[in-house]
Image: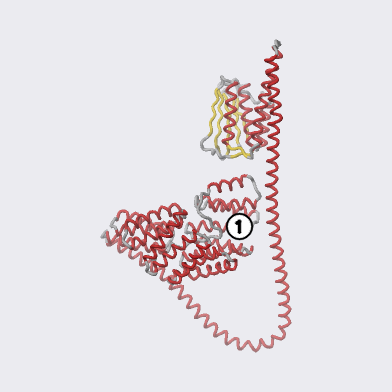
Amino acid sequence: MKRKLLSLTFLMLASYCFPQDNSKIIDSLKQVIYSKPSDSIKIKAYSDLCWYYRTISKDSAFKYGNLTLQLSKETNNKSGEAQAYNDIGILHYDLADYAKALKHYRTSLKIRDVLNDTMGIAALFNKIGLIHQNTFKLDSAIFYATKALKIYEDKNHTRYVAYIKTNIANIYRGLKQYQRALDTHLEIAEVNKSINDNLGLTRTYNNIANAYLFLKDTVQSESYYLRSIDLAEKHNYKKELAGLYNNYGGILHDMQKYTKAIEYNTKALRLREELKDNYGITSTSLHLAGLYIDLKDYTRAKNYLYDGLSLSEKFNINELRMDAYDKMASYYAYKRIPDSVMFYKELYKSLNDTIYNSRITKEVAEIHEKYDTAEREKEIQTQRAEIAEKELKLNRKNTQIIGLVALAALLFILGYLLYNQQKLKNRQLEKENELKRALVEIETHNKLQDQRLRISRDLHDNIGAQLTFIISSIENLQYGFKISNDILKGKLTDISSFTKETIYELRDTIWAMNKNVITLEDLQGRISNFIDKANVSASDLNFNFSVDEALSKELVFTSVKGMNVYRIIQEAINNAIKYAKASSVDILIENKNNKVVFSIKDDGKGFDLNDIKEGNGLNNMKKRASDIDANITFDCEKGKGTTIILSV
């Protein structure tokens, strides 16, 4: 049963969060990045995205962690660099890749030492201690946990003190000091209750259950497991539930309640697969294999056994690999295949000997080192007696020199401390200036937005109203007076049509001004409305409009870019209606080589670019494309229609 509990160590992070739907937070962080903020704000957004993607997509989490590290190095942002190494280390820890996790934690620790980031240092001490705990280096684990505890106690952080004490209590359990571990966990539970830390209380109940189990009090152990499961299910703590289901399944197994044990272990396996917990998946797979062996369901037992063995070898988890070899031997014993039983018994013995011999070799080396040290001490004592007399003669001469050196050292230390203090002040000023710049950028952006909204309201309320008045006046002239002059009638009709077109153009401009960004869905709707109007004026012309499904409707353009794209498409369609004598126009929006490509194709009479003198229409389209750093091409030939392609 003790081996089943080896996977119970909990990772306490410097900044923790409760399970929640992170999609809205992720979307808002991406909007911050799209708004082109300062480098320091972008680094913070990248770091937060790494954290929130951690339980959703490890690939995305690594991507944003590496972006944080890259930008921090480029801008010499040491605080961001330390956080990036910390975050990437956590991702490796989650994948049970402890060597890489430790490497990143230590790199982060060096930077935070220089920055004098006390809280960050404490969090890293704790994480390094947890890695040593998971790899059974318990002396190193308690060393780092104690260093973290001292910092949190000095800072009077009750919640973090409780977390560190939990880890220390688990180390006591590893050292077989079970009563001491239980007493510590019971003390922590009261602290968790006093500060309403439900996540901490869930973990503490689980640890109390483990301690009672080692003290062979199964009744109390089961009681605390059920309390912990109830809290975890109530608050949807998936990571904790995975461990709890696994551990409670182990108790049920020992009580020979096999069906119920399989139910809880299966739930644990599903959660651990969802969380991509390699150690947990391996452990639970072997638990299920043992259950099915006891039930004599050898087919299912074999599947779980091979899964557990394969994973333990892949991730080099020696204690679980030994468990897999042991269960394999039991499996083949039940199947009455003695050769396979002997094969896995030998593997078990070989691995056990390797682990034992490594430990013995280390202990022997330590004894030799102590012996050599003792011999050296004897030689040193003899030499000291001989040297003492000579040193006495030199002491007087050296006193003045030592005094001068000490004075120089003192001056150097004072200078160094003053330099460091000034350096810290400069860093603080730099951070304050960055914050001020960010606030100024936000304030300027808000002022510009207010100004745009005011201008758009003025356009709508004043110029829009005046244009509408002109149309109304012309219609009153047409219908209120009997105008017999056909030329005058035509002129009035032209003025009315032109004014209506101007109103449409004005509405498009107001639409763009009222938005910070224009989504692909907004643009698609605007183009559809324009095509509907064009269909009315050119009823003999067939329009086909389609958008590639691979393009996200959430794709955004700046208002300037979106408006220019719309105007180019509008101009292209107008040209097809006025000059091309086409029977159909195809408008297509698609994704090519990470660019959005807009194509407008007609089957009209076409034209030769070399023969035609460019008018305002073509020049306007080229100018608009240039303004938004887009590429526009005209594929046309007389008698074969025209295709205009805009790549953004």
Residue 523 appears left or right of 259: right
- Judged from this view, the residue extending furthest toward the left is 336
Name above or below for residue 371 compared with residue 164. Answer: below
* Residue positioned 44% across, 54% down in the render: 233
Q: Secondary structure at mark 1?
A: helix
Q: Which residue corresponds to mark 1?
A: 81
* Residue positioned 46% across, 61% down in the render: 203
Q: Residues within 10 Å of mark 1 (few under 14, many from 20)?
A: many
Residue 281 position within the rendered picture, expressed as x and y whole percent measured from the top left: 41, 56
**Displayed quadrant of residue 106:** bottom right
Name above or below for residue 543 compared with residue 627. Answer: above
Near-viewer residue (149 or 273): 149
Name above or below for residue 366 compared with residue 123. Answer: below
In this view of the protein, can residue 26 be seen by the observer? yes
What is the quadrant of the C terminus in the image? top right
In this view of the protein, can residue 137 be seen by the observer? no
Near-viewer residue (36 or 62): 36
Residue 247 position within the rendered picture, expressed as x and y whole percent measured from the top left: 40, 61
Near-viewer residue (130 or 393): 130
Q: Amino acid at mark 1?
A: Glu
**Displayed quadrant of residue 477:** top right
Residue 158 appears left or right of 402: left
